[in-house]
Amino acid sequence: MSNIDNLIIIRGGGDLATGVVQKFYRAGLPVLILETEKPTAIRRSVALCEAAIGGFMQVEDVPCRKINGLRELFECISAGEVALHIDPQGKSISSACPRVVIDAIMAKRNLGMCKGLAEVTIALGPGFCAGKDVHAVIETVRGHDLGRLILDGYAKADTGVPGLIDGKSAERVIRAPCDGFVVCHKEIGDTIAQGEVILSVDNEAVRAPFSGLLRGLIREGLFVHSGMKIADIDPRTDIDCKSISDKARCIGGAALEAFFLLRTKKC
């Protein structure tokens, strides 16, 4: 494989990562997503990582195709598509020679990122030190600082409490009550009433804590662990579940800004 100029590698293809991908894709830059074989994203309708399972996924104007190796990367990029490769450890990064590597795994800890991976390295959220682990960190906590570029130091620590939306916070995120396989009884986009069964884990029913819109739901058949995020309810019922969120767009714009800022500083 010949090197692709200005290649952007993004580790992770969840909903926030997809907001980042869209900004770089619209800027005309080639993008490669590195994902796991069985992604556990819950906002699957706006997550390009779904291509890891189905082979292809499109979110808004961004088409994404799974490739079986870097030998297929040039063909995919030339077809105007984002490429997705199964490589959770990032072993292919050195072979691909990217201009930028972005950690969008959202693991709240560093899973192998370092400044030496590319000319520009960026990480989303807590778990990284800008200036040490990566060149820039992007704040991901909702509020005044959302999308702020951090060039020295850390993002805010993870509180484990989701942002407040229409008076709902922690209860918006549904977690697995036990270890087991998932069976879904609802679909993303369904309007659900308080107490309705959303899904079951190991035959244990998981019910809606309040009425709202089912915005996120883990893929049926996956094995999950107790306490793992498995669904997401939004108290607002007029949300478009097939469009990238305001938070993801903000973070995506910040990542693109970081790229141009850091590239200019290095020139």
Image: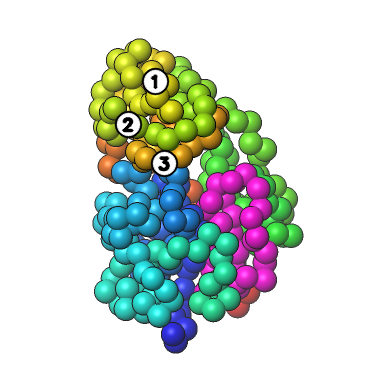
Q: Residue 72 appears in which quarter of the rendering?
A: bottom left
Q: Nearer the viewer, residue 214 or 165?
A: 214
Along the viewing direction, whichever of 7 and 194 lies nearer the viewer: 194
**Colour scheme of the rendered structure:** rainbow
Few, some or many residues within 10 Å of mark 1 (<14, 14–19, 20+): some
> Which numbered disc flags the more N-terminal residue, 1 or 3?
1
Left or right of residue 73, residue 238 in this image:
left
The secondary element bearing badge 1 is classed as: strand
Would you say residue 48 sits in the magenta stretch?
A: no
Q: Please give the range of residues in magenta.
A: 98-125
Which residue position is annotated with label 3? 222
As for residue 105 lying within the magenta part, the answer is yes
The tag on residue 184 is 2
Query: Is the C terminus in the top left, top right, bottom left or bottom right quadrant?
Result: bottom right
Viewer-side residue, 53 vs 170: 53
Q: Which mark is residue 94?
A: none
Mark 1, residue position: 205
Marks 3 and 2, how far apart at CA: 10 Å
Q: Can you say whether 156 is above or below 86 in the image?
A: above
Residue at left 37%, top 48%? 47
Going by the numbered disc 3, the residue's amino acid type is: Leu
Residue 172 drawn at (x, y percent): 45, 24
Amino acid at pointer 1: Ala
